[in-house]
Image (cartoon, grey):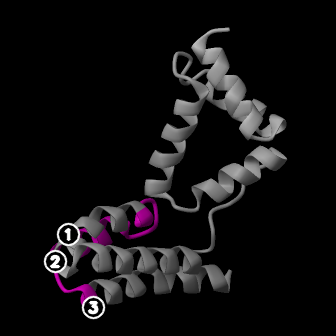
Amino acid sequence: MSDLEREEELARVRLDRRMAGRLLALLRPVVPRVSLVVAIELVLVLSVIFRPWFIRQVIHFLKTGQRLADPPLDEQRDVLLRHYDSMLSYYGAETGSRMARKHIGWYSKGLPGSAEFRGAINHAADPIAVKAMIRAFYAPLIAVKEAA
């Protein structure tokens, strides 16, 4: 048994067999020479950076075979605000604000008006102003979704 086969077997033991089989089927064409464990870690780590709810979606897909929609915009906004506060607490206001800019951009990517929003965020220095801008950006989008 090769190292790759051994790693795959260990991963299958740790995961539910059905879930591991589905994940292996999804990953094998994309990363045929990378071990299953490394592939799983890479996909999850990179995806969670951009969309923190991705793990919930992956688990749902592996259990049911069905894709789970992104959470509602108000939940996405709340996650973003908590993430922003955490970055400010950990790095301090100045460094945290600068580092959070790219994360704010990733959260808002694909939403209407997100390019302009990212541009404005990149020039804002005050954390209170940034939070207000986040709320102001998401408010009309949430209102449209609720009216529909």
Image position of 141 (left or right of 65): left
Name the element at disc 1: helix
Quarter of the image with the N terminus in it: top right
Name the element at disc 2: helix
Q: In which quarter of the image is residue 101?
A: bottom left
CB-based contact (under 8 Å), mark 3 and mark 2? no
Name the element at disc 3: helix
Residues packed near mark 3 inside 10 Å, few (<14), some (14 to 19) or many (20 plus) = few
* Residue 58, horizontal then vertical, whole percent: 67, 49
**Magenta span main SS:** helix
Quarter of the image with the C terminus in it: bottom right
Q: What residue type is labelled 3?
A: Ile
Q: Which amino acid does label 2 sit on?
A: Glu
Q: What residue type is labelled 1?
A: Arg
| Mark identifier at residue 98 | 1
The Cα atoms of the two marked residues, 2 and 1, are separated by 6 Å
Q: Which of 1 and 146 is in front in this view?
A: 1
Residue at the disc numbered 3: 128
Q: Which residue is drawn at 75% across and 53% down?
A: 60
